[in-house]
Structure formats: structure tokens, C-alpha cells
Image (spheres, rainbow, N blue to C red):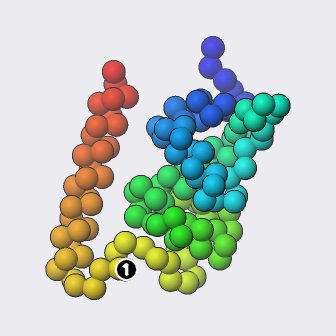
Amino acid sequence: MAKGPEAFRTISEAADELGTPQHVLRFWETKFSFIRPMKRAGGRRFYRPQDITVLRGVKTLLHVHGYSIKGVQKLHKDEGLHCLIEAAAGRVPRPSGALPRLDTLIKDARSRQGLVQARSELVAAKLRLDTLLASH
């Protein structure tokens, strides 16, 4: 029986829903102060629907848009939680200040273009793999 959209999720359910290992969710809790699932006796984590949305935004910024952990921290500090929720919905926030992002660290335009192309190909390959895995 599937849970409703407003039901709390255990860490294993959250990890499955996000396609992210549980240890990564625990690691993100140490790096992002805004990730605070409810904890019951014994330390068992329960994620609210908004927690899942925020985690999805963090994952999108890190894995799709190339933000660093510090970049996501700065985005949250400067712009607030709504930017992470926007990222989860597929809308990349336009930060007011400069963020440490991979593409800004590369000075040479040819190297940057090569990395952008390679990253684009990797993202496309990952989407194809996700689609194949989801159909099985």
C-alpha cells in the first residue's frame, strides 16, 4: 500500500524516492543545517513532504547544475529555502551574488566548452539509464 503525498517518509523511503543512497542523506544533514528531519526515539528519521522537496532541490543543484556544497550553502544563506524548492521544481534560481560553481572555476574558454559538452553528454546518459532502470 502506497503512502499518501502528505505522509512522512523513513530514510529508506526518502532515499528510494530521491534515488539517493541513505548515507548521502545523512551526509547532507551534516553539511546543510536546513535539512532537519524529525527524529523519534532511537534516532529514527522521518522526512516531511517539504523535507523531500528540499532534498530534491539540493540533489538537483549538486548533481545536475554543478553547484558545490559551499555553493548550495551560500545560495540558501543569500536567497533562502525557496530557492531550493524552486530548484526541485526544475527552475534554477538566479542568485544575487556569485556562487562557487564548477563552470566559473575554469578560466580557459575551450576547456570550459569541452567540460560543458562532456557534462551535457553525461547528464543525457544518466537520464537514459534512469529511464531504463525505472522501466524494470
Taking the spot 48% from the left edge, 40% from the top edge, the residue there is 20
Q: Quadrant of residue 30?
A: bottom right
User: In x, y percent, where is residue 60?
Assistant: 47, 55
Instruction: Residue at the far front: name it.
Output: 42
Compared to 103, does 127 lie above or below? Answer: above
Instruction: Residue at the far right: name it.
Output: 41
Quarter of the figure with the C terminus: top left
Quarter of the figure with the N terminus: top right
User: In x, y percent, where is residue 27?
Assistant: 57, 50
Taking the spot 19% from the left edge, 77% from the top edge, the residue there is 111
In this orientation, which residue lies closer to the viewer: 92 or 69?
A: 69
User: In x, y percent, where is residue 2?
Assistant: 62, 20
Compared to 57, does 101 lie above or below? Answer: below
Residues packed near mark 1 inside 10 Å, few (<14), some (14 to 19) or many (20 plus): few
Q: Is residue 8 visible?
A: no
Q: Quadrant of residue 9?
A: top right
User: In x, y percent, where is residue 14?
Assistant: 59, 35
Taking the spot 22% from the left edge, 84% from the top edge, the residue there is 108
Taking the spot 45% from the left edge, 66% from the top edge, the residue there is 67
Residue 29 left/right relative to 114: right
Q: Which amino acid is tagged 1?
A: Thr
> Circle 1 sits on which residue?
104
Compared to 30, does 47 lie above or below? Answer: above
Compared to 133, does 102 lie above or below? Answer: below
